[in-house]
Image (tube, rainbow, N blue to C red):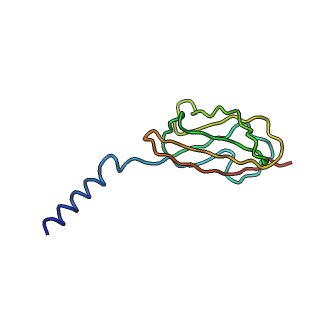
Amino acid sequence: MFHSTAAIAIATLLLASPAAALAHAFPTGTNPPVGSTLKAAPTEVVIDFTEELEPHFSSIEVLNAHGARVDKNDAHLAPGNAKRFIVDLSRLPPGTYKVIWHATSIDTHKTGGSFRFTVAQ
């Protein structure tokens, strides 16, 4: 009985340790919104995350329907907000675009994903 009680106590301590508090950065919102159709082309893509990012190990790429990159390859954190990641866009003609993102939170956890938006005719 003592051994199982001790094992439970140790497991509880391990789960309550600071390492258990480490989190992954997941998107909480995007602009343009995921799956949206826009009347006017955006000038940037913005992704808000649940955790602060390490910008040197995070990225946003925007591709046109042919797979060509249409962003300015300048992904950066918003001034004063390490949870907001932005990339500027070249002038976008009507079409569907794919955003591919990779995020590394400041605690080094990595996440990634993609979404699409459309610029209407």
Residue 43 percent location from the top left of the image: 73, 36
51 sits left or right of 7 in the view:
right
Q: Picture quarter containing residue 94?
A: top right
Residue closest to the eye, 60 or 118: 60
Residue 102 percent location from the top left of the image: 57, 44
Residue 22 percent location from the top left of the image: 40, 47
Toward the bottom, the furthest residue is 1
Residue drawn at x 53%, y 31% is 80
Residue drawn at x 54%, y 43% is 103
In this view, 24 is above or below 83: below
113 sits left or right of 10 in the view:
right
Toward the left, the furthest residue is 2
Toward the right, the furthest residue is 121
Residue closest to the eye, 92 or 102: 102
Residue drawn at x 59%, y 33% is 76
Quadrant holding the N terminus: bottom left
Residue 9 percent location from the top left of the image: 21, 59
Q: How many marks?
A: 0
Toward the top, the furthest residue is 79
